[in-house]
Amino acid sequence: MNIGQASKASGVSAKMIRYYEQIGLLPQVVRTGSGYRAYTDADVHKLRFVRRARDLGFSLAEIADLLALWGDRSRKSADVKRVAQQHITQLRERMDELQQMVDTLQALVSSCAGDHRPDCPILADLAGSAGKSQPG
Amino acid sequence: MNIGQASKASGVSAKMIRYYEQIGLLPQVVRTGSGYRAYTDADVHKLRFVRRARDLGFSLAEIADLLALWGDRSRKSADVKRVAQQHITQLRERMDELQQMVDTLQALVSSCAGDHRPDCPILADLAGSAGKSQPG
DNA sequence: GCTTGACCTTACCATGATGTCAAGGCTCAG
DNA sequence: CTGAGCCTTGACATCATGGTAAGGTCAAGC
C-alpha cells in the first residue's frame, strides 16, 4: 500500500505520516525499489491509533508513550490509566483558563451598550480600568 | 524609558515588545542617538493594553483591531462588543472540544482497572475498539 | 581613563502540529 | 510515448514565544 492509500485508510495526511516517521514517532517503513513507502495493514492500524489519540488531544510525546505501552505485552493498565488521567488534568486546566477568560469577557460584554456611542467598558478595562478610552 | 523599564512596567517581555513592533502591531518608537528604543508612558499604556488583551486570549490580529478601535474617537461601542462576542464564541467552541475529549477520556479511565494487568480499555479504544491490545 | 556589569541592538534557531508549494521521479492506462 | 496522478524530498509559513550569540552602549567605581 502506498502512502496515499495509507493516508485515506487511516485519516492521517500523507504529510503527517512522513512527519511522524521523521521525528521517530513511527518506525521507518519498507520502501519499494523506486523509493515509495510501502504500508501494511498493521502500519495503518498504528496510524489510526495515532489519529484517535490526536483527536483526544494527546501530544505527540504522550502518544509516543501510549504507543510504547500498546506494544508492551507486559504493561500494567495502571500505567496507561495514569497517562490518560494526567491528560485529563491538563485538559481541565486549559478549560479552566478559558472559562476565566469567558467569565471576564462576558461581564465586560454585558456592561457594554453596544450602540453607536464610543463609550465602551471593554476598552476601558483593557486600557487599565482607569476609564481611559483613548491611548493617551 | 528604555525597553527594559517598559517591559517591567507593562508586563510584556522585551523580546515581545520588539516583535510587536516588527510585525506592525505597535508603531516604531523613537530611538536615542545610540539606537536604543525610548518609551513614553503612553507607549507603556499601550503595551499594557496588549498584555491584558493577550491574557483574555485575543490573538494579535484581534488585538490589532482592538487597538485601532481604542484609538478611534468615532468608534461605535457595538464594534468593540462584536469583536469581544466573537472571541467569546471562539473560546466556548474550544472549551466544548476540550469537554468532549474529557468526557471520552473520563469514560475510558473509569472503565480501566488500573492495576498490574495489561488489559486496558483505553488502549483498546485507541486501537480501534476491536479489542486489539497489541499493534498487530 | 579604564574596567566591569548591566543593559541594549540585531539576527538566527527552536518550539508543535500542520499546510502549501515546488521540482522532479515513478507508474499505469491509453 | 504521453499524460494524469501518484510519489519523493525540501523549503517555507503559521502563531506567539523563548533562547542564544555576537557585539555596541552606558553608568558607576577605581
Image (cartoon, coloured by chain):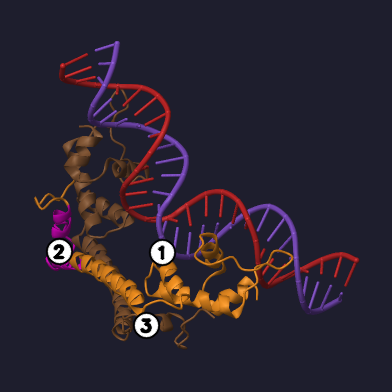
Chain colours: A brown, B orange, C red, D purple
Q: From this viewpoint, is residue A89 visible?
A: no
Q: Nearer the viewer, mark 3 or mark 2?
A: 3
Q: Which residue is mark 2?
A: B108
Mark 3 — on which chain does it sit? A
- Give, as a three-letter code, the residue at label 3: Arg
Q: Dot 1, how many residues are within 10 Å of its Cα: few (below 14), some (14-19), or many (20+)?
A: few
Dot 2 or dot 1: first in sequence order is 1
Q: Residue B124 location, x and y as percent?
A: 14, 54
Give the residue drawn at x 20%, y 53%. Answer: A52
| Residue B48, numbered circle | none
Viewer-nearest residue: B111 or A102 = A102
**Of all residues shown, which one is farthest toward the left?**
B130
Are both tags, 1 and 3, on one chain?
no
Q: Residue at label 3? A: A117
- Spot occupied by residue C22 in the image (x, y as percentages of width and height): 41, 34
- Say if A33 sits above or below A30 in the image: above
Q: Amino acid at mark 2?
A: Leu
Q: CA distance from mark 2 to mark 1?
A: 38 Å
Q: Residue B105 vs residue B68: left or right?
A: left
Which structural element holds mark 3?
loop
> Residue B118 appears in which quarter of the rendering?
bottom left
**In the rendered image, residues at marks 3 and 2 fall on the same chain:** no
